[in-house]
Amino acid sequence: MGNGLFKPNISTMVGQLYGEGDNRRDGAFTIFYMGINLGSLLAGIIAGTASTHYGWKAGFLCAGIGMLLSLVIQLVFANRYLGKIGVAPAAKAAMDESGSNKKQPLTKVERDRLKVIVVMSMFVIIFWAGFEQAGGLMNIYSQEYTNRMIGSFEVPAAWFQSLNPAFIIIFAPLLAVLWRRMGSSEPSSPIKFAMAMGFLALGFVCMVGAAMQQGGDMSVKASMWWLVGAYFFHTLGELCLSPIGLSLITKLAPLRLMSVMMGTWFCANAVANYVAGLVGSHVGDAGPLAIFGGIAVTAGIAGLLLVLCSSKLVDWMHGAEASANRTLTQT
């Protein structure tokens, strides 16, 4: 319940910092996303280390202190940096400003923009269904079928789970600067999603390489660098999709439905995790090569479909991405 109140609303608050058509929004969400992963990385280290050396109670105590500390930070700094954002519902503030307290039916523009959210959610499910193999199938693969030796030291399989947040912290600022500097040449959100699908496909091509190195002999262990490459490309894909998706919701959803649509967006992630489990569960029947190759092909086809329908999706946005629209017109 706490996360449900926290996660959709903090994302919409970030979106309210920028006006419609402001091309700084995607970069801001990428920095925001980096902060999330930095917190995740530090939380695992602090709570994990405390529980290892001082017992479970110490780990839970650290988590509780972290929650209280975040509340103090919000109370001290929110007004200074956010002003009235988040103090009152944005939809209510807009209604008060317009002098009308009557809820209006959805306009054609709003309906078209909601259609974009629905369509993009379908592709989000495909992306996360592949990406979330990191916590399941790829985790098992790193444990059982990967040569993790560097000299006489064996790299713990769990360490590979830290590659994703580490890559995010490194590359998120670079992508944020890139989107900002591209200006009117910045790709539209559908094209960024297509890029994410392409990177996901490349990551699983690396995993196909690992499976081919085994040559069907599960007693042979693949190089760990295939996994490093897969996590690298998957992280680039995540940065082209996840923060961009959060930004997209704040661009397209009507104010009165903003948090609801943000929550719906996260529901797509839940469906994707379920699909990821179903796909990963068939590795014993189909084998790693078939699973990895199948995900790579599916992601590639999804990316191609996004490119083909990107013009229509941008039209349905009705200028929500002004700079992207100008680029499309010029080309």
Image (cartoon, rainbow, N blue to C red):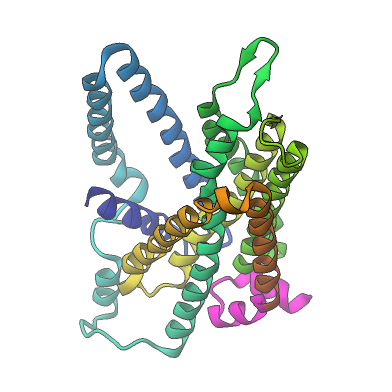
> Can see residue 164?
no
**Total numbered badges shown on the rendered structure:** 0
Name which quarter of the figure residue 170 lies in.
top right
Q: Farthest residue in the top direction?
A: 152
Residue 144 percent across, percent down from the top left: 58, 31
Who's the residue at 41% across and 24% down the image?
A: 45
Give the camera-side residue of 125 and 178: 125
Who's the residue at 51% across and 70% down the image?
A: 122
Q: Quadrant of the C terminus?
A: bottom right
| 55 left or right of 153 in image | left
Residue 99 vertical placement versus 55 (above, below): below
Residue 127 percent across, percent down from the top left: 56, 59
Residue 136 belongs to the span the image colors magenta: no
Q: Main secondary structure of the magenta part?
A: helix
Residue 312 percent across, percent down from the top left: 63, 82
Residue 235 vertical placement versus 218 (above, below): below
> Can see residue 230?
yes
Q: Which residues are drawn in magenta?
A: 309-331
| 148 left or right of 265 in image | right
Who's the residue at 55% across and 63% down the image?
A: 126
Residue 192 percent across, percent down from the top left: 64, 61
Who's the residue at 69% across and 65% down the image?
A: 184
Residue 320 belongs to the span the image colors magenta: yes
Residue 275 vertical placement versus 41 (above, below): below
